[in-house]
Amino acid sequence: MDRVRVGMIGLGGVGTWGHLHGYEEIPEQAKLVAFCDTNPGVINEPAKIHGAKTYSDYNQLIADPDVDIVDISAPHFLHGRIALAAIKAGKNVLCEKPFTTTLEEADAIIAAAKDRGVKLMVAENTRFVRAYQVASEFVAKEAIGKICFARTYLGGSEVIRLSNPENWIGKKNTAGGGVMFDAGVHSFYLLRWMVGEMSTVQATTITFLKDLYQDVEDNAMGVIHFKNGAIGNFTLSNTTEAPWTERLELFGTKGSIIVDMLAERPIQVFSTKNRSDDMADWWSHYGDVGWTEPFIAHSALEWKPTSMRREVQHFVECVLEDKQPLVTGEDGRRDVEISLKCYESAKIGKEIPV
């Protein structure tokens, strides 16, 4: 196989400005052959451009013999059932986060993918954000020593989307949860990647815009203990009136890393790794320990869709070259598990093991 045939299910915001353009950038490796959405207005134009088929029932797209990859960007509650059906049909699956709304669904999908021998990847764009990749490289070479404290912030506004009362995002039965579930999985993946596995969490939530969010939270925060002894916290908000952004802070025994997606130069690194242990020589070595700002291509408004395009292109490469995706079904399951544990913690007001 030298080119994969892609069928996309769901062409809302993420499916269009993220996934769709990612495939369009690699026409020699991927061909868009089918689109499915309950709203024909969002699929007719791309279908015409690519000469692709259109469906309103995802089962019809899954049954299409011309489809090699099923790309799922549907509402959260549909992720599990669509992914499982596609895998049972022998399709490779790229599924948007959160992977599923229950752990039982996640387990069934992971097992089915292994049984059918198909590729499965959770569309966690965090792994493909260049600033995070550079931060990970500094962590790996111990430029900041052992991380003792980490902090994440994810925030933006969902007010416009939720002004439509029929939107699925603000309801538990269709979204699976609020900002803890929708955005929290990003933070949990990022912290596990940078720091390591978690041992306990203690979380709290509020619903500030009660007229928009019917039964889920719009703000959340929590404290995490890691198995390696480090501690961290996370803050999540769907009521922040600013461009959707993320921030990561890593503090280690030999330095610090700050990633700020709203900054023109999004990553700063401070390291004392090469500093002299002789205090009399400290100032003569100051040039080795100042802040540095590694240059990377970055846009405060485009980093997220750019990472999504890189994400789908990675999955195409994995299918064509028979490689293991960087973000696995097990990763997606673990992040969902932590989110669910955070809800449990918030409900009882106590720290709990994860």
Image (spheres, rainbow, N blue to C red):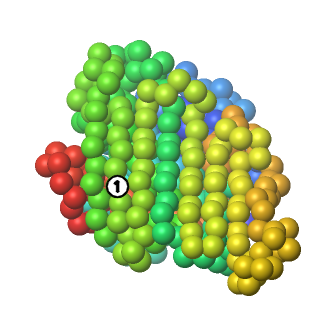
The residue most toward the left is: 348
Q: Please report the residue visible at 70 percent of the width from the left and 63 percent of the height from the top.
A: 270
Residue closest to the eye, 177 or 269 = 269
Q: Position of residue 262 (x, y in %)?
A: 67, 38
Q: Quadrant of the C terminus?
A: bottom left
Q: Is residue 73 left or right of residue 347?
A: right
Image location of residue 142, percent across then percent down = 64, 77
* Residue in the picture at 34% in, 50% down: 222
* Quarter of image, res 134: bottom right
Res. 151 in view: yes
Q: Quadrant for the N terminus, please.
A: bottom right
Is 207 on the left or on the right of 231, as rendered? left
Whole-percent x and y of residue 273? 70, 77
Q: Position of residue 282 (x, y in %)?
A: 77, 75
Q: Nearer the viewer, residue 113 or 349?
A: 349
Drawn side of residue 277 relative to residue 211, left or right:
right
Front residue (pair 284, 32): 284
Q: Is residue 126 left or right of residue 37?
A: right
Q: What's the residue at 42%, 44% (across, down)? A: 235
How packed is label 1: few (under 14 Cα within 10 Å), some, or many (20 or more)? some
Can residue 80 be seen at all in this image of the molecule? no
Count of numbered circles in the view: 1
Under tag 1, what secondary structure? Answer: strand
The extreme bottom residue here reads 278
Q: Identify the residue position indicated by label 1 in the image.
A: 223
- What amino acid does circle 1 point to? Val
Q: Nearer the viewer, residue 36 or 94?
A: 94
- Kindly identify the residue that appears in the image at 29 percent across and 59 percent down: 201
Q: Would you place residue 350 above or below residue 278 in this image?
A: above
* Position of 234 relative to 335 (above/below): above
